[in-house]
Structure formats: C-alpha cells, structure tokens
Amino acid sequence: MTKKCKCGSKKYGYGDGVHEVWICYNCGSFDGQAHGDETFIDLIMQDPNIVLTLIQAETLVPIRD
C-alpha cells in the first residue's frame, strides 16, 4: 500500500499490527502511528535509522491493501 508524499513521490507503509511507518525513499521523510506507544515514538525520533533496522529484521512488514 502506498501514500503520496509532499515531494510527489510515493510513501511506502510498514507495520507490525500496532505501529505503522510510512517512508518516502525519494526525500527521506516519514510519518506514522504508534497507537499510544510513546517509547516507540521516542526511539524513532532519536534515531530514525531504527525504522530501517526494523524493516530489515522483518519486525515491520509491508502494509498490504
């Protein structure tokens, strides 16, 4: 599933059933939902590269329609 980014490119969604992260691989912007998990938000804001690590570990998987 994709969304449109402000830069005009696609944002790709990844999730684990609780958390969702939408990434634009063109400009690097990302957003998402943590459904009240403040620890997850804090970790991502401190080190955005954690998102890529979670995707590589298949903790966050592509969101399908």
Image: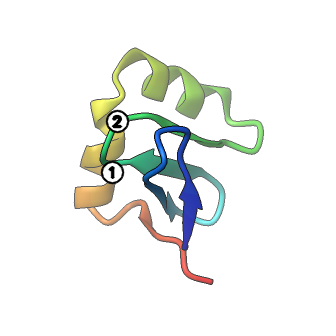
> At x 25% / y 60%, what residue is drawn?
57
The secondary element bearing badge 1 is classed as helix
User: Residue type at mark 2?
Assistant: Gly
The secondary element bearing badge 2 is classed as loop
- Res 43 quadrant in image: top left
Q: Is residue 47 above or below residue 29?
A: above
User: Residue type at mark 1?
Assistant: Leu
Q: Residue furthest top?
A: 46
Q: Position of residue 2 (x, y in %)?
A: 53, 67
Question: In the rendered picture of this protein, how many numbered marks are placed on residues?
Answer: 2
- For the N terminus, the image quarter is bottom right
Residue at image mark 2: 28
Q: Residue furthest right?
A: 36
* Colour convention of the picture: rainbow
Upstream in sequence: badge 1 or badge 2: 2
63 or 8, nearer to the observer = 8
Q: Is residue 27 above or below residue 52?
A: above
Residue at image mark 1: 54
Disc sitting over residue 38 in the figure: none
